[in-house]
Amino acid sequence: EAPAAAPATRPAPAEPPRADPTQPPGAWQDTSEGRQATLVYVTERGRRDQTQAAAIVVSSDPDNAHFQRESSPRVTVLRARRAALTGLLLDLERLGLERLPWTEQPYDAEIGPARALYHYEGGKRRVVFKDALDGPARGVFTEVEKRVIRFTLDS
């Protein structure tokens, strides 16, 4: 009788996409190459009749205030290595990120509760709100948000 096959396992990445969650932001070290940027995806959590705003922050920019935040029940902060975030941004660009109708905003403006994606890079901030989209652009936003969520879960 043949031995049972070993369960499939996912190989460990050569360099983890995020730091030890117990490490304070000030101790962050990243020697990887890539883009220094921050994405903030604002969504909703809870049941349909009792939702509240929640956010996922993915950042490789230690100078960005969102990178310095601690995760909380409503905000998940993922400090990504530049190489990992660059890979995510390239994936999002292939999905159509740059075709979305972005609006530039002041860098430190408040983030509202509406479902949106905020992108900080090169000293600039831009935003796209899902409710303002229709047709193909809404479909692109949906694919982008799925990929951001998957990146967070895979990290």
Image (spheres, rainbow, N blue to C red):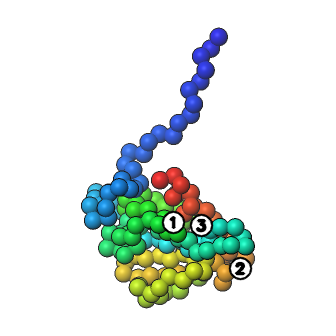
Comes first in the chain, label 3 or label 2? 2
Comes first in the chain, label 1 or label 2? 1
Question: Which residue is nearer to you in this view: 33 or 13?
Answer: 13
Question: Which amino acid lies under the numbered mark 2 shown in the image of this protein?
Answer: Asp
Q: Position of residue 127 (x, y in %)?
A: 53, 81
Determine the CA span between mark 3 and mark 1: 19 Å
Q: Quadrant of residue 25?
A: bottom left
Report which residue position mark 3 lands on. 145
Q: Is residue 29 left or right of residue 107?
A: left
Q: Quadrant of residue 23?
A: bottom left
> Is disc 2 placed on a helix, strand or loop?
loop
Report which residue position mark 2 lands on. 134
Question: Which residue is nearer to you in this view: 71 or 92?
Answer: 71
Query: Which quarter of the figure is the N terminus placed in?
Result: top right
Q: Which mark is residue 73?
A: 1
Q: Residue at x 56, y 26 (%)?
A: 6
Depicted 64 relative to depicted 25: above or below = below
Q: Residue at x 44, y 42 (%)?
A: 12
Q: Which mark is residue 10?
A: none
- Between circles 3 and 2, the one closer to the viewer is 3
